[in-house]
Every structure is written in structure tokens, then in C-alpha cells.
């Protein structure tokens, strides 16, 4: 966002004027130059808690929607509102996303939103999924996923949409795009986000088999960037953010935009078509049956 002060050179939208001093880089630099004690701003709804440290410009977002942080329409709406608030807040330059639910980062899209509902509902739900990805993948903030639990499908997409992924080392946690295991297909923009992270060959095998990778394997294939013990997660995420924030925002943001633009533009150009495809696909009897069997399987696993 351009600062409201007059600038000596043209300032492209979404990009800050390149100040010469590192202390002045970034949106937080636009605050009056008064030394303030650490200040925290908190906002919360019943799905998500956000805490913004205005002195460092770093926000931490915690998913807190029991039992498994599934991405329902309500959750996605709250998520998008929170992202928008932070994106528009000049005091915020970075976002760490993590979970307040033990053992689960996010269980992915809420299957109940894709089962036995009207075509209008499917369209509304899918638009919300798209919106979440557009906001996160296209964010100008530094985004770090601090993955403290399993993260299948849509949960993995959230992590993939960040700039950096740190996962807790735990042999029980898994992450991946397992849509094929549910008898559904990851849409092209899930696939593109995955390919941009792990490369074509790894993505092709992982997607076709619907693999959920254990943490060590996820690290080996580049799906996560680092693996740490649980107690080190927040400290590591803060250190990574500090490293990324040491660069001038405008250079980092332009580079990020250059790397992600093609995929974002492709989705925007096909957004309505993608919604129609989803509605048609998910409404099929055979797909509804697959989802029903999958939910049954989840319930049986418990008993
Ligand atoms: C041609 C193409 C055109 C267009 C594109 C078309 C289609 C694309 C469509 C969709 C893409 C979807 C992406 C997704 O995200 S689908 C969701 C995938 N998620 C999963 O597979 C995760 C399933 N869940 C689990 O594996 C486990 O629950 C767990 C590892 C997350 C947690 O295990 P626990 O043992 O701790 O807990 P559970 O007892 O299993 O679960 C508790 C409770 O929660 C319910 N639940 C779990 N996950 C979901 C979910 N994703 N949605 C809704 N509900 C979920 C589970 O059933 C339990 O409920 P009950 O307590 O039994 O009521």
C-alpha cells in the first residue's frame, strides 16, 4: 500500500516506497517515529484467534475450531476476514499461521459442506475456498506456516500457500494432498501450488496416489522446509520471519508477485468456470457416494 505522504517517485500500487534505511523498511515504518513499548492487538472470533505485535509487525493466527479445524464455510469466511484485516493494517508485515488444536493443523475442507447440499451451496462454498487461496497465496505479507499437527488436503493447501513451512517432528503427523484417496480430484490451482513447491515429478506421484507424507518424508521432498521439536516451533517461526523481514518489503513483495503471478492470474481468469466444474463434479452421485463412504470410514476408524 502506498504511504499517504508525498513520494518523490511513482509508487506502484501494493508496493512501498523504497526507503534507504533498513529500520524504515516496511509498512510498520509508516507509523510515527515514537518509541513505544511492545504493543499487542488481538482480535478473535469463534474459529480463529489473531494477535498482532505492532512493534515487530508480526501477527500470529491460531486456528481454534474443534475438533479438527475443518474448513467449513463459516471458518473460511472468518479466515478471509482476518486475512483482509491484517493485509490492510500498515502495522502488520508478517503472519505466522498455526493451530490451537492439539495434533491437528487443519483437516482440510469440511466434507459435510460438499455432501448432500444444494448446487447453490456448493458454488458459495467453492467461491470461499478460492477466496481464501487468492488472499493467502497472493498476500503481500511474509507468511509462515507453523504446522503443529496433521494437515491433509485443504490444510496442506494453506501451508503450501505460505512463503515457508516449518513442521513439528512427530511420527504421527502427516501432510499432503490426499484428494485421490477420497475419490475426488485436486483442482488445477491446488496442483499448481503444489508443483511450485515440490516440482512436477514429485507432485505427479504424490497427487495420483493421494499420498499423506510423514514429516521426515515431507521434508525430504521439499513439502516442508524445516522440521523442529514442538517446543521450538514458535521460536523457529519468529526467527524465519525476522530473516525475511530484514529485506525491504518492496523487493520481497515484487519478487513474490513475479513468482506467483502466473498461477494466480490463471485461476482468476478461470474462476467462474472452476466453480461450475466443482459444482458439476461434486454433485455427481458417484462422487457423493465416495464422500459418504469416506466419512463412514473415518467414523469406523474411531470405533
Ligand atoms: C474435475 C475437477 C473439478 C473440480 C475440483 C473438484 C473437486 C475438488 C474437491 C474437493 C477438494 C477437497 C480438498 C479437501 O480438503 S477434502 C478433505 C480431506 N480431508 C481429509 O481427508 C481428512 C480426514 N480426516 C482425518 O484424516 C482425521 O480426522 C484427522 C487426521 C484430521 C484427525 O484424526 P483424529 O483421529 O484426531 O480425529 P477423527 O476422530 O478422525 O475426527 C474427529 C471428527 O472430525 C470429523 N472430521 C475429520 N475430518 C473432517 C473433515 N475434513 N470434514 C468434516 N469432518 C471431519 C470426523 O468425522 C470426526 O467426526 P465425529 O466425531 O465422528 O462426528
Image: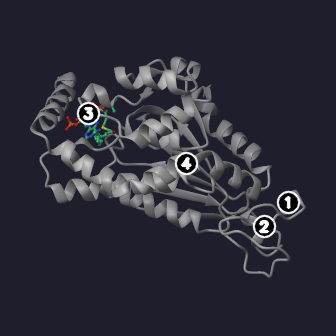
Q: Tell which circle, 2 or 3, labels the residue nearer the N-terminal end.
A: 2
Q: At 51% across and 64% down in the image, what residue appears?
A: 84
* Position in image of residue 202 (x %, y %): 50, 21
Count neighbours of disc 1 (C-alpha within 10 A) and say few if under 14, some if 14 to 19, many if 20 or more: few
Report if the beta carbon of the residue with label 1 is closer than 8 angstroms to ligand 1.
no
Q: Secondary structure at mark 1?
A: helix
Q: Tell which circle, 4 or 2, labels the residue nearer the N-terminal end.
A: 2
Q: At 26% across and 33% down in the image, what residue appears?
A: 184
Quarter of the image with the N terminus is bottom right
Q: Is residue 48 above or below residue 230?
A: below
Out of 113 and 31, give the one closest to the viewer: 113
Q: Is residue 29 above or below residue 198?
A: below
Residue 212: mark: none
Q: Which residue is mark 4?
A: 262
Residue 23: mark: 1
Count neighbours of disc 2 (C-alpha within 10 A) and say few if under 14, some if 14 to 19, many if 20 or more: some
Out of 66 and 91, give the one closest to the viewer: 91
Which quadrant holds residue 153?
A: top left
Task: Name the side, left or right, on which 3 lies relative to 46.
Answer: right
Task: Name the side, left or right, on which 216 lies relative to 287.
Answer: right
Report if the beta carbon of the residue with label 3 is closer than 8 angstroms to ligand 1.
yes
Report if the beta carbon of the residue with label 2 is closer than 8 angstroms to ligand 1.
no
Q: Tell which circle, 2 or 1, labels the residue nearer the N-terminal end.
A: 1
Distance Cα–Cα, label 1 vs label 4: 32 Å
Q: Secondary structure at mark 2?
A: helix
Residue 184: mark: 3
Distance Cα–Cα, label 3 vs label 4: 25 Å
Amino acid at each position: 500500500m502506498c504511504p499517504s505522504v508525498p513520494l518523490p517517485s511513482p509508487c506502484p500500487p501494493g508496493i512501498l516506497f523504497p526507503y534507504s534505511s533498513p529500520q524504515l523498511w516496511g509498512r510498520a515504518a509508516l507509523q510515527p517515529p515514537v518509541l513505544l513499548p511492545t504493543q499487542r492487538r488481538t482480535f478473535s472470533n469463534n474459529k480463529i484467534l489473531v494477535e498482532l505485535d505492532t512493534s515487530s509487525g508480526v501477527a500470529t493466527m491460531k486456528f481454534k475450531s474443534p475438533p479438527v479445524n475443518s474448513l467449513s464455510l463459516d471458518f473460511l469466511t472468518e479466515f478471509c476476514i482476518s486475512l483482509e484485516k491484517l493485509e490492510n493494517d500498515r502495522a502488520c508485515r508478517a503472519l505466522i499461521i498455526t493451530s490451537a488444536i492439539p495434533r491437528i493443523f487443519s483437516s482440510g475442507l469440511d466434507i459435510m459442506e460438499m455432501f448432500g447440499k444444494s448446487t447453490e451451496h456448493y458454488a458459495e462454498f467453492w467461491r470461499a475456498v478460492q477466496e481464501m487461496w487468492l488472499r493467502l497465496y497472493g498476500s503481500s505479507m511474509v507468511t509462515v506456516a507453523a504446522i503443529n499437527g496433521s494437515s491433509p488436503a485443504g490444510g496442506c493447501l494453506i501451508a503450501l500457500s505460505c512463503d515457508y513451512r516449518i513442521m513439528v517432528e512427530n511420527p504421527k503427523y502427516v501432510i499432503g494432498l490426499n484428494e485421490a484417496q477420497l475419490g475426488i480430484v485436486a483442482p488445477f490451482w491446488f496442483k499448481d501450488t503444489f508443483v511450485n513447491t515440490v516440482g512436477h515429478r514429485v507432485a505427479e506421484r504424490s497427487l495420483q496416489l493421494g499420498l499423506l507424507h510423514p514429516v521426515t518424508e515431507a521434508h525430504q521432498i521439499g513439502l516442508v522446509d524445516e522440521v523442529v521439536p514442538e517446543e521450538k516451533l514458535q521460536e523457529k517461526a519468529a526467527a524465519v520471519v525476522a530473516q525475511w523481514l530484514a529485506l525491504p518489503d518492496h523487493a520481497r513483495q515484487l519478487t513474490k508477485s513475479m513468482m506467483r503471478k502466473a498461477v494466480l492470474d490463471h485461476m482468476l481468469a478461470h474462476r467462474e468456470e472452476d466453480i461450475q466444474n466443482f459444482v458439476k463434479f461434486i454433485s455427481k452421485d458417484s462422487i457423493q457416494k465416495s464422500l459418504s463412504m469416506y466419512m463412514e470410514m473415518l467414523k469406523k476408524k474411531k470405533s
